[in-house]
Image (tube, grey):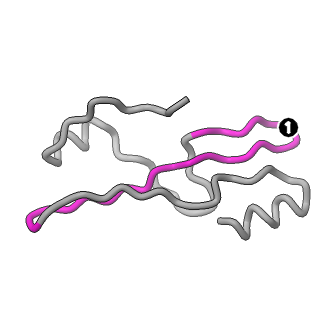
Amino acid sequence: QRVVDVVLRAFGAAAASQGCMNNLTFGDATMGYYETIAGGAGAGPGWHGRSGVHTHMTNTRITDPEILERRYPVLLRRFGLRK
């Protein structure tokens, strides 16, 4: 991810992204859960940067809260972007 940021910056195409991937894991001997959590993308000459989007790493999206609660023994108290 950081290499892509450097190349985009060298051409003046976009500001840096978060530059790394956040992960959430939990489980026990009977089940396991793994999620990549998006950081954000840098702004460019004609657009604003974005929070909460994957950049330069994956084509996945975060699991919907309803699916997470239905399939795993968890209850989400809050789901959103921090300000």
Relative image position of residue 43 (x, y in whole percent):
77, 42
- The quarter holding residue 50 reads top right
Give, as a three-letter code, the residue at label 1: Gly
Q: Quadrant of the N terminus?
A: bottom right
Relative image position of residue 45 (x, y in whole percent):
88, 42
Question: Which residue is most to the left?
Answer: 30
Q: Name the residue rendered at 47%, 56% in the picture.
A: 22
Residue 30 is one of the magenta-drawn residues: yes
Q: Which residues are magenta?
A: 29-51
Question: Is 42 positioned to the left or the right of 81 in the image?
Answer: right
Question: Is 81 positioned to the left or the right of 62 in the image?
Answer: right
Vertical comparison of 2 with 70: above or below: below
Relative image position of residue 40 (x, y in whole percent):
61, 46
Graded by Cα atoms within 10 Å as few (under 14), some (14 to 19) or many (20 or more), the crowding at tag 1 reads few
Relative image position of residue 68 (x, y in whole percent):
25, 44
Residue 56 is one of the magenta-drawn residues: no
Question: Which residue is most to the front?
Answer: 83
- The quarter holding residue 76 reads top left
Q: Which residue in the protein does label 1 denote?
A: 46
- Number of residue marks: 1
Query: Along the line of sight, which residue is nearer the eye, 61 or 79?
Result: 79
Question: Is 47 positioned to the left or the right of 24 in the image?
Answer: right
Q: Name the residue rendered at 20%, 39% in the picture.
A: 69
Q: Name the residue rendered at 33%, 30% in the picture.
A: 78
Q: Name the residue rendered at 8%, 64% in the picture.
A: 30
